[in-house]
Amino acid sequence: MVPVSIPHPDKFPPSLKKLTLIGSHVSWQEMSIIGSLPKLEVLKIKDNFFSGPRWETCEGGFLHLKFLKLSHLDLQEWIATADDFPSLERLVLNGCFDLAEIPSAIGDICTLQAIEVYRSSKSPVDSARQIEESQRSWGNDELKLFIYPHFQEDTSF
């Protein structure tokens, strides 16, 4: 298999707002290129486009990202802070069976409105519930948590 890499950010249209990446097995280190796209609001990563056990996000990226969907990835460890996704409103996990947990700092994102977990292992579900509980203890009853044990395709974005 020929190694695939992501082009420099200036190779993408400057007004790009939505991006879906499917099945190329690119290293998670290259995600910082996607994070630097200045107007990106919707990002869907499917079928191991990024491959590997660990993703550590970088502060200063994803400034306008509102929707993040991670679907059918071999990701095991995700390290992130609230500063890594300052505008995130909705997080969707689908078929992330190897993921140990959703980073607890995701719950510190003040714009976060919903977390949806579809057909994933118990660990991401448990961490999503902990994030919801933490938000409620801070008086935020606005965060919605949706857990679906069976596949359901999201078509709202």
Image: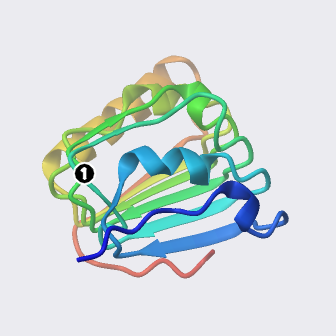
Quarter of the figure with residue 83: top right
94 is higher (above) or lower (below) than 91: below
Quadrant where the image shows the C terminus: bottom right
| Left or right side of 22 for 7 | right
How far from the left and from the top, in percent, is residue 56? 39, 34
Which residue is rendered at x = 23% and y = 75% of the image?
150
How far from the left and from the top, in percent, is residue 40? 71, 58
Q: Nearer the viewer, residue 76 or 30?
A: 30
Label 1 is placed on what type of residue?
A: Leu
Q: Secondary structure at mark 1?
A: loop
How far from the left and from the top, in percent, is residue 79? 36, 31
Q: Nearer the viewer, residue 27 or 105?
A: 27
Which residue is rendered at x = 65% and y = 44% of the image?
62
42 is higher (above) or lower (below) than 110: below
Q: Is residue 140 visible?
A: no
Which residue lies under the disc numbered 1?
Answer: 75
45 is higher (above) or lower (below) than 138: below
Q: Residue furthest front?
A: 2
Q: Nearer the viewer, residue 38 or 64?
A: 38
